[in-house]
Image (tube, rainbow, N blue to C red):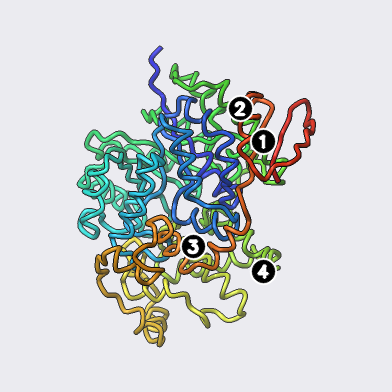
Amino acid sequence: MAKNLQFVDTTLRDGTQSLWAAESRTGMVEAVAEDLDRSGFQVVEVPLMPYNFKKIIRELKEDPWSLAEMVGKKMPNAKKAFMGEPGLVLFELLETPPSVAKLFYDLLIERGAINRVQTMANIFGNLKTDFPWFIPYLRSKGMEIAHAIAYSISPRHTDEYFLKKTQEVVKNEPDIIYFKDAAGLLTVERLRTLLPIIIENANGIPVEFHTHCTTGLADELYVEAMKMGIRTLHTGIPPLANGSGQPSVFTTVANARYFHLSHDLDLERIKRISDRLMKIAKQENLPIGEPLEYDYSQYIHQVPGGVISNLRHQLQSLNLQNRVDEVIEESIRVREELGYPVMITPYSQFMVTQAAINIATGERYNVVIDELIQLAAGVYSEDSGYLMMDQNLKDKFLNLPRAKELRYKPVEDVPIKKLKEQFGGPTLSDEEFMLRYIMKGTNDIEEMRKAGPHKKYFSASTPLVDLIDRFSKQSDITHVQVQGLKGSLLLTNK
């Protein structure tokens, strides 16, 4: 039996973003990193996007460079991927000098934390022409490049649209093309019409498939994809599978047997990872992904699961958690008025953020986020939908006083040395500069450092000698309490 089915593990990046509002603590990743490295996955996603850096510093109070360092050391063999883009900070794509973006990549690559970059081919425009430095830079660093073609439903997302996008992607000569259904909107019938278009026009470039379980159809879609010749699927490990995340690797493997497809996964080791993450989820009171019933509303609002997860988290912090449904309903109207942008980062966040402001203020577009003013001006790519935007709304945005301030100017490639002068001076380390650049100052960084070392997670499967060695290096530990959890142990230092 040929071992010809491969897997991209999404547990720590897309899984946590979809189900845990991106709660990827350093200790959580550390608790499973070595096993993930040896589990036989073709690729393992890691939570090291600039978005993750913001979350880790501001909310989790941890140093993301420690996470990157640990990922490089604990996962030396795995091909490690993250969602990359030619800018640096989400929502600030157009303001990031290439020198800063390159430095961010350099620091991760030096630590061995990434060696595959996954980017959205129909989000940031034509990468080859609009960002001519990006692909050559990645090639010079030996990165594997995976271009995602994001699925969406609207009057303009036709078969011809996806044919054109596939042809554009092929011209960029990526190593991988993957069909990405970020909001879990595909049906088997639509997959049967679109997947052949992408495969037949991929010019021999391998095609992967990625979907979410949001509508309850994901497992059936993966079965159909296998029938159609797809041999690399994106899956998660429970508890960070199902729900609004990816299908479970266990279910996908079980279904693959009926097509005489084999694999190189160490399922016993993956089961240990699942058990460990389940214990962490219960200890931290985090959601456990479960299969969802068919949800037709997803086809109406099209908001990705990760965006909804973060929306609930943020509205709860504002004591507005009872208005989630109102915000999602408003986002449907906002998207239509703005020309049907593809509902994936960053556009899905733009729609939901503006919808939340409309609901919170009680007046539609009384306050307008900068990104929608830029969108109306045509600053973003054609995929932003600005060519079909409601003309009255476009005129309103472009006549706002803020529009003059946001008038697009080509980004200059400012030397890092010059930029450092704005954030602390020439003696500032590259790592510290990058933190200050991402966080726009030092306040959040200082609060993060006051919080002390990151939380550690140990389990009974961790060898006793290794446990003692790790504890001996933790100067803040003066007492250890051992607590039984259904026959296993889970120890922490906080």
Q: In the structure shown, which secondary structural element does the residue marked by tag 1 occupy? A: helix
Residue type at mark 1?
Met
Q: Nearer the viewer, mark 1 or mark 3?
A: 1
Return the disc, 4 or 2, that comes first in the chain's sequence. 4
What is the crowding at mark 2: few (fewer than 14 residues within 10 Å), some, or many (at least 20)? few
Q: Distance between the residues labelled 4 and 2?
A: 42 Å
Residue type at mark 4?
Leu
Return the disc, 3 or 4, that comes first in the chain's sequence. 4
Q: How far apart are marks 3 and 4 (CA)?
A: 17 Å
Residue type at mark 3?
Gln
Q: Label 1 belongs to which residue?
A: 278
Asked if the residue under mark 2 is in contact with the one under mark 4, i.e. CB atoms within 8 Å, the reply is no
For image coordinates 64% across by 45% down, the residue present is: 455
Q: In the structure shown, which secondary structural element does the residue marked by tag 3 occupy? A: helix
Q: Label 3 belongs to which residue?
A: 349
Residue 345 to residue 175: above or below: below
Asked if the residue under mark 2 is in contact with the one under mark 3, i.e. CB atoms within 8 Å, the reply is no
Residue 211: image x %, image y %? 47, 42
Mark drawn on residue 466 = 2
Pick whichever, 485 or 463, lies toward us.
Answer: 463
Mark drawn on residue 83 = none
Residue type at mark 2?
Asp
For image coordinates 28% across by 60% down, the residue present is: 98
Asked if the residue under mark 3 is in contact with the one under mark 1, i.e. CB atoms within 8 Å, the reply is no
Q: In which quarter of the image is residue 491?
A: top right
Q: Label 4 belongs to which residue?
A: 318
Residue 286: image x %, image y %? 68, 46
Q: In this view, does 11 lie to the left or right of 397?
A: right
Q: In the structure shown, which secondary structural element does the residue marked by tag 2 occupy? A: helix
Pick whichever, 272 or 196, lies toward us.
Answer: 272
Q: In the structure shown, which secondary structural element does the residue marked by tag 4 occupy? A: loop
